[in-house]
Image (spheres, rainbow, N blue to C red):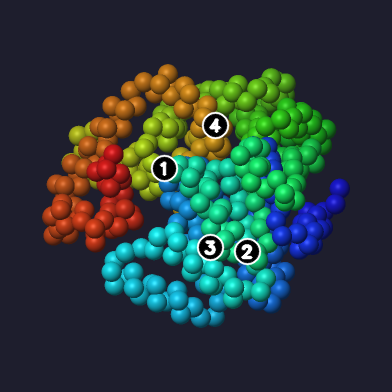
């Protein structure tokens, strides 16, 4: 098999000769990892005056509007210039003075102006299918990219969705599927990084090969292949002896819902405190009205009904929380939003959430009311502000950016 560097280089050369490439992929095929590799390659081999911009769309991020995505592309291009374009500077000064924000047409116009400063321009849009369709948000975003950057080479990744495929029917297309060698490489790396599993296997190459072979066959490439492999290896890692490990290996399921069901059962089988914490995390992620920042979740877990003040010694550690969730949740490094590891997992848990957490609304409401009570009785005495002053337009960002975690969410929802 060709090395990753060789394959990426070959793809980049091929992309140089095409204006637009559309990648269609099955869920969990690893397209985002591959896109990250492509971006890294382009940034390290860029030609003089070439611009490289990208966006990663996320299904549960309400900030991913057409305006914000176009603004992100503009910001990235501006950062690649030695000076700020006069039109951008004038717009910034005007909106700063008026305390307003540009609308989509103005963002697009500025993107077009700055875009023409780059004789060569690469634009990468990952997971377009996860861009919200609400109010034609996805359509507007694509339209503005095409209109503002007509000379750009565009790379788009998406799942197989007819309405998206129809928008690129005249463009070059590549189907992405994780092959066996990709999954084997992933599993080998995972085993080497999990000390307890590596120690259990020891020098048994035959056992290592059997684990990899079995999991590759179970993650059969129909859907969510890397995610299946990750949850399967997580399952066998729970065992502390070879006999039980091999028994668990032989019972690994193939049905996606069964895989998720087993993962939830592994959570329940942990020590009571870890299991309770994991259940709390899954409950909050499942029922919240908007995605939570990790800092907000920490406070949600630390607050107890009847509290009169925050007890920061109760704030749990990130690594312990993620470990307790057995690979089902992640924290986005850029946004710091905590979410399910894959949208298919969220769909599964949402479909059974009333059975899993019948008292979720009551428990969440109690914690949110307690948070507001703590906030109104303590925070202002030290800051000297009133509730109205803190939640006015000028100060609202202070509530939302970490100064008072969870408070703005509690006030709104």
Residue beneath the point at 31% across and 28% down:
361
Q: Secondary structure at mark 4?
A: helix
Q: CA distance from mark 2 to mark 1?
A: 34 Å
Residue 330: image tag: none
Q: Which residue is disc 1 drawn over?
A: 291
Q: CA distance from mark 3 to mark 1?
A: 23 Å
Residue 73: image tag: 3
Residue beneath the point at 75% across and 59% down:
18
Sequence-wise, which precedes: disc 3 or disc 2? 3
**How many neighbours does mark 3 have within 10 angstroms: few (below 14), some (14-19), or many (20 or more)?**
many
Q: CA distance from mark 4 to mark 2?
A: 37 Å
Residue beneath the point at 71% across and 30% down:
222
- Residue 16's quadrant in the figure? bottom right
Q: CA distance from mark 3 to mark 2?
A: 14 Å
Disc nearest the viewer among 3 and 1: 3
Q: Report if the CB atoms under discs 1 and 4 are less than 8 Å apart.
A: no
Disc nearest the viewer among 3 and 2: 2
């Amino acid at each position: 098999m060709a090395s990753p560097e060789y394959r990426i280089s070959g793809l980049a050369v091929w992309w140089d000769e095409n204006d637009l490439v559309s990648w269609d992929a099955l869920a969990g095929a690893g397209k985002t990892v591959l896109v990250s590799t492509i971006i890294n390659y382009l940034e390290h081999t860029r030609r003089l005056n070439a611009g490289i911009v990208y966006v990663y769309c996320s299904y549960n991020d309400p900030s991913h509007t057409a305006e914000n995505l176009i603004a992100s592309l503009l910001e990235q291009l501006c950062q690649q210039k030695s000076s700020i374009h006069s039109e951008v500077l004038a717009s910034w000064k005007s909106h700063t003075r008026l305390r307003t924000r540009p609308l989509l047409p103005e963002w697009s116009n500025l993107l077009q102006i700055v875009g023409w400063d780059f004789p060569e321009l690469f634009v990468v849009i990952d997971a377009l299918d996860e861009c919200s369709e609400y109010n034609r948000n996805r359509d507007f975003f694509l339209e503005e990219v095409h209109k503002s950057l007509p000379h750009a080479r565009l790379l788009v990744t998406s799942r197989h969705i007819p309405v998206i495929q129809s928008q690129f029917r005249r463009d070059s297309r590549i189907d992405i599927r994780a092959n066996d060698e990709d999954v084997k490489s992933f599993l080998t790396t995972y085993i080497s990084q999990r000390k307890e599993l590596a120690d259990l296997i020891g020098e048994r190459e035959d056992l290592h090969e059997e684990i990899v072979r079995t999991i590759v066959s179970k993650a059969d490439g129909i859907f969510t292949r890397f995610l299946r492999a990750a949850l399967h290896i997580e399952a066998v890692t729970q065992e502390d002896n070879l006999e039980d490990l091999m028994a668990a290996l032989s019972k690994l399921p193939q049905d996606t819902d069964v895989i998720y069901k087993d993962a939830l059962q592994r959570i329940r089988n942990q020590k009571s405190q870890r299991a309770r914490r994991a259940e709390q995390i899954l409950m909050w992620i499942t029922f919240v009205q908007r995605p939570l920042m990790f800092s907000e979740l920490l406070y949600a877990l630390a607050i107890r009904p009847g509290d009169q003040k925050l007890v920061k010694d109760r704030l749990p550690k990130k690594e312990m929380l993620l470990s307790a969730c057995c690979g089902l949740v992640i924290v986005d490094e850029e946004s710091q939003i905590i979410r399910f590891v894959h949208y298919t997992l969220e769909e599964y848990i949402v479909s059974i959430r009333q059975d899993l957490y019948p008292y979720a609304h009551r428990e969440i409401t109690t914690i949110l009311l307690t948070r507001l009570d703590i906030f109104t009785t303590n925070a202002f005495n030290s800051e000297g502000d009133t509730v109205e002053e803190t939640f006015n337009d000028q100060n609202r960002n202070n509530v939302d950016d970490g100064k008072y975690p969870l408070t703005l969410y509690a006030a709104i929802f």
